Image (tube, rainbow, N blue to C red):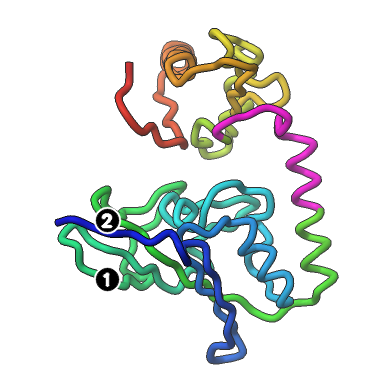
Amino acid sequence: RGALISLRGLDRAVCAPAENGRFRIEAQAGAALGRIVGLAADHELTGLEFCAGIPGSVGGAVWMNAGAFGSEIKDVLVFADLIDGEGKKKTLRREEIAFAYRKSNLPANVILCAACFSLSKGHPAQIRDRMAEILKWRQEKHPLQYPSAGSVFKNLPGMPAGRLIEELGLKGRRLGDVQISKKHANFMINKGQGTASDMLKLIRLVQETVQKERGFFLETEIVVIGEES
């Protein structure tokens, strides 16, 4: 079935009161996650502060159950609107979606259109202070001065992936213009002309080293789109 998609309104977001003193923000999947975090703060709503500084869109955050500091998107999600593989519009409530660490069971052949989040009224200063604290932490810990795809590997129970990579002596390893960051070993940064092929080779090097030295497979958090070489 063919489809005609208008780009107007793909980044729209609306804030409205809900029942039991809660508030809802409904956002199109194309809206920048940071914009929704800011919108919540502007309306003195708490619950999305953990997303401060996470790049990407609302749709991507829901799809991979983005999270940080002990909180995840599933904790505040009410429902998601989508178009299924047959071209039909559907609404799935939070309870109908199986979320896990950095993933959901949303099938690959659906288009995520919008999401609704449930938030509560908070203290404006506390919300802003928490966001500032998180952003400062990211600035100090993450290599934000270089392009990257964010955290490459999923953390293990009781062992952050970055610490494991560092313990195995791979911090700073470079292939072409893609380098395992010296600032945070779970980031691979582009030093100039890095390619997807360079990054995939570096990912495999890390996985093979972990498999050989520790005896288990380190799963990626990023999603690879397109053909792998």
> Disc 2 vs disc 1: Cβ atoms closer than 8 Å?
yes
Q: Is residue 109 left or right of residue 163?
A: left
The amino acid beneath tag 1 is: Lys
Q: Callout 2, which amino acid?
A: Val
Between discs 2 and 1, the one toward the N terminus: 1
Lateral position of residue 157 relative to residue 90, left or right: right
- Residue 30 locus on image (x, y percent): 48, 57
Q: Residue 79: where, in percent of width, then height? A: 40, 72
Q: Residue at x 59, y 30 (%)?
A: 148
Residue 157: image x %, image y %?
52, 39
**Residue 214 in sight from this viewpoint:** no
The quadrant in which the N terminus is found is: bottom left
Camera-side residue of 50 and 82: 82
- Magenta segment includes 134: yes
- Work out whether residue 115 can be spotted: yes
- Give whichever of 210, 35 is nearer the camera: 35
Q: Residue at x 54, y 33 (%)?
A: 149
Q: Secondary structure at mark 1?
A: strand
- Tell me what residue is drawn at x 48 percent, y 68 percent: 77
Residue 147's place in the image compared with 196, above or below, is below
For the residues marked 2 and 1, what is the alpha-carbon distance in whole angstroms? 10 Å
Q: Which residues are magenta?
A: 133-149
Residue 219 picture quarter: top left
Q: Return the residue at label 2.
A: 110
Numbered circle sitting on residue 118: none
